[in-house]
Image (spheres, rainbow, N blue to C red):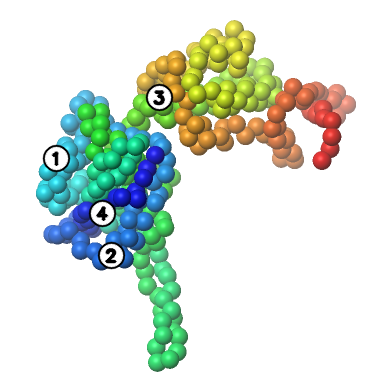
Amino acid sequence: MFEFTDTALNKLIIHGIGKKSENEGVNKSSNAAVLDEETNDLLMSYFLNPFKSEEFYAFSHEEDLKQNTLFPIITEIFENPELFIEKSGDIAWHLYNVSSHPKINSGEMYLVYFKDVTVDDEVTDAIGIFKSETKETFLKVFEKNKNYEVGYDTGINIRKLEKGCLIFDTEDENGYKISIVDKLSAGAEAQYWKDEFLKVKPRNDSYTVTNNFLDIIKGFSEHVLNEENSVETKDKIAFLQRSQAFLKDNEIFSENRFNEEVIAQPEVVDEFNKYKTDFIDRQELPEIEDGFDISKSAFKANSKYFRSVIKLDKNFHVYVHSKPEYIKKGYDEDKKMSFYQLYFNNEE
């Protein structure tokens, strides 16, 4: 997916992004940073190591891609790298202007031009935009007059990139190929990085299509295959396990085979297709075409969907790894309580 072995940090400039809610403004650097070899290596690790996900995005806009604030700026830099410093200021002000929520902290924005990044077997340039918001306190132990003393300082933890993106110089006609890191994504104010600053949407590739289909499976199991619709938990678990086996064992998705092998019952097939259509319309997603490549990375990343657990009050959790047909549910009239029977051969 990513290969950074031959990647070089070609240019770097840092701007201070003040707290918008307090009108602190932007503290712009005039020149690119000058780095020694050791600092260069540390920054390469800080910037690039967090990028592992195969989920890609692209710049978007409701009306015209060219109206996305960052898209034309990034295009100008790729076409003329000499504009790197000048255009970095425009990016910094854009980041500042979308950081209006009072919970968004001030910090530093790093704009980086990388040479020779390999993504999906293609070697290209990339522009990285990163922001650090959190300073940590660390101890410094040093020798003084043949004794060791302890002091402290504050700085950035190079193992905790908070917000970043890599914009690869490929597929510009579709809004570029973009990878995102956003470690502080809890709360509405944190969504500004992806939704307001970058304004991106998931690319319609195998990873995204597989991810969307997994969301549909999860939603259908929760909202349709439930006790309100007279569906027992063990039958819901059986559906999830058949879905898991199908996606794990196949390279290409076949709607007919999924309907036959996973859903099986014609009336449930109709309910699933109706839920899928409603989900796609509600989430404003592209249609899921028959015959898409099943992304094993997306499947692995969302394997938590298939953790089949029956939670009984606050007393018991029953983990069902397979064979849900060996579970029988009943009701005890004397105790006025429900129960499960589990059938097995050996106790370990």
Residue 146: quarter of image: bottom left
Q: Nearer the viewer, mark 3 or mark 1?
A: 1
Residue bearing the label numbered 1: 79
Q: Give the residue at mark 4.
A: 9
Tell me: residue 69, above or below residue 144: above
Question: Which residue: 47% across, 33% down?
Answer: 298
Q: Could you tell me which secondary element the residue under label 3 belongs to?
A: helix
Residue position for label 3: 283
Taking the image as shown, residue 317 lies to the left or right of residue 275, namely right
Q: CA distance from mark 3 to mark 1?
A: 35 Å
Disc with the residue nearer the chain's start (1 vs 2): 2
* Quarter location, residue 28: bottom left
Q: How many marks do you count on the picture? A: 4
Q: Are marks 1 and 2 in contact (CB under 8 Å)?
A: no
Q: Determine if residue 5 is in view.
A: yes
Is 340 located above or below residue 75 in the figure?
above
User: Which of the marked residues, 4 or 3, is nearer the chain's N terminus?
Assistant: 4
Residue 271 visible = no
What residue sits right under mark 2 in the picture?
Answer: 37
Which amino acid type is shown beneath numbered disc 2? Glu
